[in-house]
Amino acid sequence: MENVMFMLSEQLGLLQDTVQEYVQALTTPAQLLCGLFAFIYIGMGIWGCWANGKSIDFYRLIKPFAVGLVIVFFSAFTSLLNMVVYPIELATSNIANTLTVQYADAQQNYHQTETNVRNAMAAYQREYSNELTSSEAESSPASLQLHTYQTTLHVLCNLAQMALTGVVLFMKVYVVLAKLVLLLIGPFAFALSLLPGFGANIAKWVSHYVRILLYVPLCCIVSSLVAVLFSTCLYPALVNLFANLPTSDYNLVQYQQASTGQLTAHFFVLLFHGIAIALYACIPTFSKWILSVGSLSRNNHLNL
């Protein structure tokens, strides 16, 4: 999995370099459109002032020149937006990397404990498979039902872990691709803002771009929260659940306790993985909340 992540990061880096070249190539037609739309914008502004008998608002007519400058220096403009979020991204990534080490240690400790219990249960099954009490226990409906539940939850836990890994990979790829799409359409969105009915294009583009930029620190925050949940709540509790069981030489009562403990452990692992997936799925909502709170505060300030 680490090799896949490394190869994916390299390919995404190459894709970013390629898209940056296309962005530079697309700024030229965007500048031409901006110049054409500037004549329309200025002409309609002057005609509207004359038709209403008002003086010409020269400050409003500066907008085409400002938009043209942004298109010419579009890379610098996006770099400025990136720098606004970069300190938060750096801080959250450092926290996530620190907690990931703690999470990996707790996960390894749990897997080692769970493996010891599984091996001891397997040894008990091999050693006492011919005894009457063991045969009766294994052939009882309750024992068969418990084994079915264990197998089902174990498979579901593996699928949930794969789904969590897939969600993390999807978020990383989605952030890069969405950012690149916004970079490609950005110059044209700015140029179209000079036409009637498209005046909000700039605000919408900046809002979408900042929202995508916030995905990375939000992913780091969610990753940190998931690491804390697993390393301090789930895995230590599951290790304590198996702490009273010996590492070998099970009897029938201890075998049943280990089976029930495995069933409980698989259930809580599945539950926590579901919570983690839900947190990652809520990252777009968290990003919208941040921007909506900012816009709400600005509107309240204007109303005052």
Image (cartoon, grey):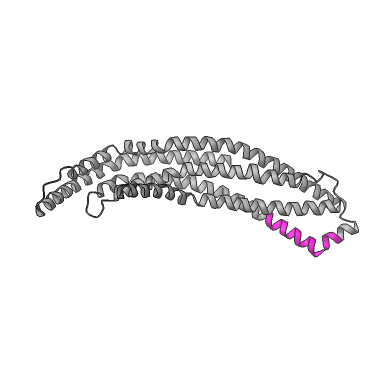
Left or right of 99: which side holds 83?
left
Residue 147 on the magenta span: yes
Residue 247 on the magenta span: no
Residue 67 image position (x, y, % from top left): 24, 42
Residue 301 image position (x, y, % from top left): 33, 47
Q: Foreground residue, 56 or 268?
A: 56
Residue 133, image quadrant = bottom right
Q: Foreground residue, 228 or 295?
A: 295
Q: Residue furthest right?
A: 132
Q: Residue furthest bottom?
A: 141
Residue at position x 12%, y 46% in the image: 56
Left or right of 274: which side holds 26?
left
Q: Read off the magenta span.
A: 136-154
Residue 211 image position (x, y, % from top left): 41, 46
Left or right of 37: which side holds 126?
right
Q: Main secondary structure of the magenta part?
A: helix
Q: Foreground residue, 104 or 239?
A: 239
Residue 62, image quadrant = top left
Residue at position x 24%, y 38% in the image: 69
Q: How many marks?
A: 0
Residue 14, image quadrant = top left
Quick one: quadrant of the N terminus?
A: top right
Residue at position x 47%, y 46% in the image: 173
Residue 294 image position (x, y, % from top left): 38, 46
Q: Is residue 187 above or below residue 52?
A: above
Q: Residue furthest front?
A: 304
